[in-house]
Amino acid sequence: MERLFCNKCQTEKDINLFYRRKDTRTGRTTKCKECCRATMREYHQKNKEKRNAEKKIWYQNNREFANKQVMRWRKNNPHKVREYNMKNSNYYKYKATWHQRHPEAWYCWKEYKRALKDGVVKRGDGCAICNQVCYTEAYHKDFSKPMDILWLCKRCYCHIAKELYVNREKEDETFYKNTSDYYVSI
Ligand SMILES: [Zn+2]
Ligand SMILES: [Zn+2]
């Protein structure tokens, strides 16, 4: 096994501990990998502010391109995005494990969604309770009957779901303002 001498830490090391470089006599860098990294780290530390400012300007000038790159990365690395979200977002954690905690509701949801996609059922044009014409949500009184759907507006849906799932004794005024509360509490 060939060994090389590192200029920086002054020790002889295995050749594999040196980066490849075409323009040197040995075909490797004169510093070992460890020393190269240390030098780069020092350099970055010294130029941190300058580099950050440069990056910021670059981002401002290439915003669209940068965002596209991020979106592409997110698309190509869904498991990493998921991992990150599971670590950092309570809401995501709640959402991602919802089907485990409510298997019967999840099964029902899957069934009616498929029926909706296949055209077996049609989304209602308006709320069955307040008759408001709007985008409606599917309300199931019985999760074992996925096709037994009551189409409700968001407000009526929340109101009914609240009575059904949360069983709060008094009406919470902040309930409608903060629907994320609702999602966490069922
Ligand atoms: Zn070294
Ligand atoms: Zn309604």
Image (cartoon, helix red, strand yellow):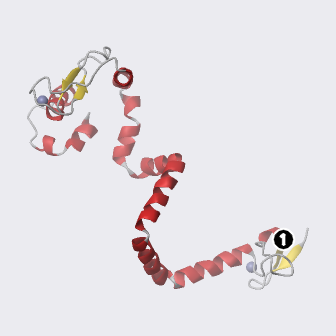
| Quadrant in the picture for residue 61 | bottom left
Q: Quadrant of the C terminus?
A: top left
State the residue in front, 90 or 81.
81
Q: Quadrant of the N terminus?
A: bottom right
Local SS, label 1 = strand
Q: For the point 40% across and 52% down, which residue is it?
A: 88
Vertical comparison of 13 with 182: above or below: below
- The residue to which callout 1 is attached is 14
| Quadrant in the picture for residue 21 | bottom right
Left or right of residue 103: residue 158: left
State the residue in front, 94 or 71.
71
State the residue in front, 80 or 69.
69
Mark 1 beta carbon near ligand 1 (under 8 Å): no
Left or right of residue 161: residue 104: right
Q: Residue furthest right?
A: 1
Q: For the point 9% across and 42% down, which residue is it?
A: 173
Q: Which percent across, then down, holds residue 59?
A: 43, 71
Vertical comparison of 99 with 172: above or below: above
Q: How many marks?
A: 1
Three-letter code, disc 1: Asp
Q: Which percent across, then down, holds residue 80?
A: 52, 50
Q: Quadrant of ligand 2?
A: top left
Q: Which percent across, then down, holds residue 30?
A: 78, 82
Q: Which percent across, then down, holds residue 132?
A: 11, 30
Q: For the point 49% across and 59% down, which residue is it?
A: 69
Crowd tier of the residue under label 1, counting other residues whose Cα lies within 10 Å: few below 14, some 14–19, many 20 or above? few
Left or right of residue 18: residue 119: left
